[in-house]
Amino acid sequence: MTITDKVARRKLSMLELAQEMGNVRKARKIMAYSRQQFYEICRNFQTYGADGLT
């Protein structure tokens, strides 16, 4: 597993956590991502799928 794969997996985990918790703010704090980063990750995932997380 490359570093790029690890980063993509971490981003996907954050999105899943936010969905499970129903609370974006808490998920961002737990995973240490800013609000801007979170919504950028969401946009990339919605547009490009899993490939957008790399």
Image (tube, rainbow, N blue to C red):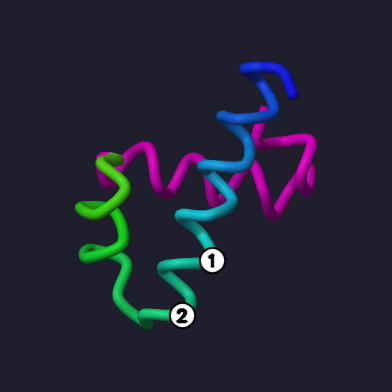
Residue at figure coordinates x 36%, y 80% from the top left:
21
Residue type pointed to by label 2: Glu
Describe the element under mark 1 as helix, strand or loop.
helix
Q: Nearer the viewer, residue 19 or 9?
A: 9
Which residue is labeled 2 in the image?
A: 20
- Say left or right for 54 vs 40: right
Which residue is labeled 1 in the image?
A: 16
Magenta segment includes 36: yes
Q: Which residues are magenta?
A: 34-54
Quadrant occupied by the N terminus: top right
- Say left or right for 4 vs 47: left
- Say left or right for 52 vs 42: right
Residue at figure coordinates x 56%, y 29% from the top left:
7
How far apart, in angstroms, are the residues tagged by discs 1 and 2? 6 Å
In the image, residue 27 sits, relative to residue 6, either above or below, namely below
Image spot of residue 15 (x, y percent)? 51, 59
Image spot of residue 2 (x, y percent)? 71, 17
Predominant secondary structure in magenta? helix
Image spot of residue 16 (x, y percent)? 54, 66
Residue at figure coordinates x 25%, y 54% from the top left:
30
Residue situated furthest front in the rendering: 1
Describe the element under mark 2 as helix, strand or loop.
helix
Image spot of residue 31 (x, y percent)? 32, 47
Whether residues under marks 1 and 2 lie with C-beta atoms below 8 angstroms apart, the answer is yes
Residue at figure coordinates x 79%, y 36% from the top left:
51
Q: Nearer the viewer, residue 41 or 11?
A: 11
